[in-house]
Image (cartoon, helix red, strand yellow):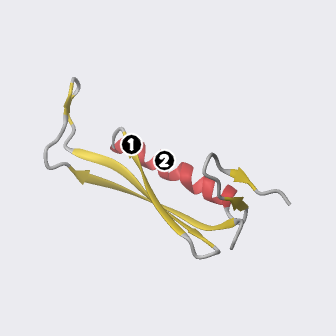
C-alpha cells in the first residue's frame, strides 16, 4: 500500500451555474452560482475532485490564479494521507 501521494497536476475551471430557483438575500437575487471546479491527479493514479463557491463572478479569476500558484508549489511533493489533518512527508 502506498503511504504517500505525489501530486501530478491540479486543474481549476471557473464556471457560472444557473440556479433553478435563485436564492434571494438582502442584496438581491443570485441567479448564478460562481464555482471553481478543481481536479487533482496524483502520480499513484488517485484522483480527486472538489469545488470552491465564490461570492461572485468577479472572484473567479483570483481563485483560479491562486490555485495555479499552489499547483507550482505542491507538485512533486510526497504527501501522507491523514484522517485528522494533512501533513507533508519528510524524508
Quarter of the figure with residue 46:
bottom right
Task: Determine the secondary structure under disc 2.
Answer: helix
Q: Is 84 placed above or below 89 here?
A: above
Quarter of the figure with residue 7:
bottom right
Q: Is 79 or 82 nearer to us in this picture?
A: 82
Q: Is 43 placed above or below 76 here?
A: below
Q: Residues within 10 Å of mark 2 (few under 14, many from 20)?
A: some
Residue at 67% x, 63% y: name it. Answer: 75
The residue pinned by badge 2 equals 63
The residue pinned by badge 1 equals 54
Task: Determine the secondary structure under disc 1.
Answer: strand
Residue 68 percent location from the top left of the image: 57, 56
Residue at 55% x, 53% y: name it. Answer: 67
- Residue furthest to the top in view is 26
Residue at 62% x, 46% y: name it. Answer: 84
Residue at 86% x, 61% y: name it. Answer: 91
Amino acid at each position: 500500500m502506498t503511504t504517500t501521494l505525489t501530486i501530478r497536476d491540479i486543474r481549476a475551471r471557473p464556471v457560472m451555474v444557473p440556479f433553478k430557483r435563485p436564492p434571494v438575500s438582502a442584496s438581491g437575487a443570485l441567479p448564478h452560482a460562481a464555482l471553481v471546479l478543481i481536479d487533482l491527479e496524483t502520480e499513484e493514479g488517485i484522483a480527486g475532485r472538489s469545488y470552491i463557491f465564490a461570492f461572485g463572478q468577479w472572484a473567479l479569476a483570483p481563485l483560479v490564479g491562486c490555485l495555479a500558484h499552489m499547483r507550482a508549489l505542491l507538485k512533486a511533493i510526497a504527501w501522507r494521507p491523514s484522517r485528522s489533518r494533512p501533513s507533508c512527508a519528510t524524508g
